[in-house]
Amino acid sequence: MTTLTMLRKKLDAKEISSVELTKEYLKKISENQSLGAFNTVCEDEALKMAEAADKKIAEGSISPLTGVPLAIKDNICTKDIKTTCSSKMLADYAPPYNATVMEKLNAQGIVTLGKTSMDEFAMGGSSQTSALAKPKNPFNTSCVPGGSSGGSAVAVAAGLCAAALGSDTGGSVRQPASFCGITGMKPTYGTVSRYGLIAFGSSLDQIGPMANSAEDCGIILNAIAGQDVHDGTSRRHNIDFNALLGQDIKGMKIGIPKEFYGDGIDEEVKNAVIKVADFYKSLGAELVEVSMPTLKYAVSAYYLLACAEASTNLSRYDGVKYGYRTDSPESYDELIKKSRAEGFGTEVKRRILLGTYALSSGYYDAYYKKALAVRQQFRLEHDLIFEKCDLMLTPSAPTVAYGIDSNIDDPVKMYLADVCTVTANIAGIPAISVPCGVNSENMPIGFSLSAKRFDDARIIQFADVYEKSFAHPTANI
C-alpha cells in the first residue's frame, strides 16, 4: 500500500521523478482496463503535468501534492478534459473551466491521470448505472465496487493512482470505500467548494478524498478546503485536518447508536465493527450507547430531498443549451422530450420523476415539506449525541459488496442499503469510512466515524489510530 507521504519522500529525495511515477500508473491503468475504473485516461496531459511538476521540484517549489498522480471523479469539471457524469447526455462535454478543487490541486502541481467512472449523474450505489465504463470490484470482479464514486474507489484499491477525488451525496464516497477496502471521507458540508461539481442534490453534495489512509485524506483536504466566492455555501476556516494525528484518545467518548446494529446489518459486518469499538475501548476511550430514533425515516427523507433537488438541477439538460440532442425532432416539445428520454438512463429518469412528483402541487406539503422536517430532527438528534460524545461509530454499509446483477432490478433494495450513510449528509456532518478487515469470502468490511460539524480533524485522528494498528486489505491485482 502506497501512501501520499511515502510518495512525497521519494519525489523529494529524487528516488523517482513525477514523469517516471506517472508512467508507472499509466502502464498499470492500461494493464487493468477490464476493471472499468476510468471513463477517460489523460495520458498526454498527465505526462505534461508531470514534466511541469518535476521542474517545480527541481526548483524547490514543492507543495504536499506536487508531482503526485491523482484520479478525478467524472462529475468534477476539468478544463478541456471530458466531464461526462458517465451519461450519454454529457458524453462529449469538455468544460471550458475548472472546478475550484481542480484549480487548487493544479496550483499544487498534481498530475491528473484521468476521469473515473461513476453511477450516471452520481445516482446509484453500484456504479453500474453508468452509460460508459462499468467498474468492477478489484477484490472480486463479479461484484460491484459500490457507488456512485465506484471508479475512484477501484482506482485507489487497485493501485491505479495515488489517491482520488469522489463526491458524496448520500454515501457515495464512503460506501464504495468500504466495498473496496480503502479510506474515504465526506467532509462537513461547506468545507469544500462545490463550484464545478455537476450537481445532484445541492444541499447534500460534497467533494471528498479517497485514499490509502486517513492521513492521506487529510493531506488532500488541506489542499482543497476553504471558502470560495463561487459557492455561497462554502465556509471560511483555518483547520489543519491532520493537526490531531498522534494525540492520545484516552478519555474520549464514542457513541454507539443501537439502531445501526439491529436487523438488516450483516452479522459479519456487525461483529467486525464491534471489534473496532473494543479496540478503541482498549486504548482508553469510553463507549456510550446512544439512540437515533429517527433513523427509520432516514432513507425515505433522503430520497425525497435528493430527488427533489435532482429534478431541479437536471432540468437544464433539455437538448437546447448543451448536452445530448436528438436527431431531427419535428417540434420544440419533441426536441426536449426525445433528448431527455434518449440522453438519460433509467435510474436518472426514475429519480427525476420521483423528485418532480414530490415538488408538485398537492404533494409538496405531504412529502417534501415533511422530509425537511425530518432533516431538522436529524440535526437535533446528532447535536444531542455530540453533546454526550466526541464521535459516533457505525458500520459504513449494512453488507459487503454484492454481485453485479444482484440489485439492478430492485431499486428499493439498493436505496435501503444507504441507511448507514445518508444521515451524515442530511445532518451536514463529517464522516469517514475505514476498512476493518474482510468477511469469510475475503470481501472488505468498513466502519464509519462521524462527529459534529467542522470537527473533521477528530475523525481523521481516530481513523489514523486504528490504521496504525491494522493494515488495509489488499486486492489481488
Image (spheres, rainbow, N blue to C red):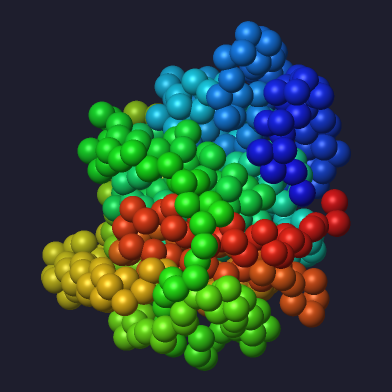
Q: Nearer the viewer, residue 471 or 293?
A: 471
Above-or-below relation of 124 to 437: above
Q: Residue at x 80, y 47 (%)?
A: 34
Is residue 331 in sight in this rendering? Answer: no
**Within the image, what quadrant is residue 318 found in?**
top left
Q: Nearer the viewer, residue 27 or 402?
A: 27
Q: Nearer the viewer, residue 75 or 476?
A: 476
* Residue 334: image location, x then y, percent: 35, 42
Relative to 184, 95 lies left or right: left
* Residue 300: image location, x then y, percent: 35, 75
Residue sticking out furthest to the bottom: 263
Q: Residue at x 66, y 24 (%)?
A: 67
Is residue 137 in sight in this rendering? Answer: yes
Q: Residue at x 43, y 71 (%)?
A: 252
* Residue 193: image location, x then y, percent: 36, 38
**Within the image, what quadrant is residue 387 found in?**
bottom left
Relative to 457, 477 lies left or right: right
* Residue 69: image location, x then y, percent: 67, 31
Q: Residue at x 69, y 43 (%)?
A: 3
